[in-house]
Amino acid sequence: MRQRHITDAEFTQPPQLVERVFNRMSSLNADQRRDLAALLDVHDIVRRFRELEDIVDQLVILKKALGIPWIVLTQMNRDIEKSESYRVPQLSDLRDCGAIEQACDHAFFLYHPEPPKVRINKQTGEEIIDKRGEEEALIAHVMEEKGIERHSWPQRINGYEAKNRDGATGKVEFLFYKHQFRFEDWQTWAALHDPS
């Protein structure tokens, strides 16, 4: 297991971000550089938007100067949760900062799929389960058969690559094991466990 080098220096002032991270990373080898986590903390709400833009600009400079990829995690706006209808996240849902949308090479969203829906056949009175309901039923069947407690069951999660400067965009489906923070391709898993 590689040692992680986490900088606890004050990276809160964007103008010093490039210099501090560059100095720190210059002393590390390639593996250590990949493991470096620079903790960015923005305190002043009044200047929040400008500081976020400055941080994004500095990260772009770092990416070019050091020749390594960066992964930036950000929250989505809460508006997507307030929406009355289910929808796939869009670039405009990135919270607080359009600079992230403009500067990134790839933008990838993780989100919960639409909840299962059950309809009633008016002629027969039978329940008709939609595709999402069938997915949940398959997960439950496999987990119960294996004797796994419900709180440890994986969840269905969707991914959406909304921006890709190098190629195609689109949706993917995952099975997410939250206790292991592990993703598995849903289609492969479902095909392997489908009883039919």
Image (tube, grey):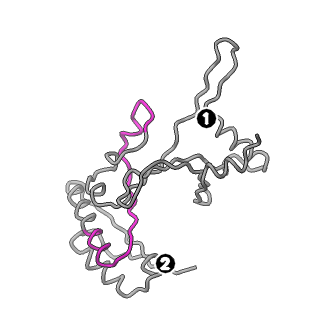
Q: Which residue corresponds to the image point at 69% horizontal and 48% vertical from the top-left?
A: 191
Q: Which mark is residue 171?
A: none
- Looking at the rendering, the stretch of residues picked out in magenta corresponds to 58-87
Q: Which residue corresponds to the image point at 33% horizontal and 64% vertical from the top-left?
A: 41
Dot 2 or dot 1: first in sequence order is: 2
Q: Amino acid at mark 2?
A: Arg
Give the labeled residue for mark 2: 4
Position above or below: 172 against 52? above
Q: Where in the figure is residue 165, as x and y percent of width and height?
A: 35, 59
Q: Residue furthest bottom?
A: 27
- Horizontally, residue 47 falls left or right of residue 106, namely left
Give the labeled residue for mark 1: 131
Position above or below: 158 against 81? below
Name the image quarter holding the N terminus: bottom right
Q: Amino acid at mark 1?
A: Lys
Residue 83 painted magenta: yes
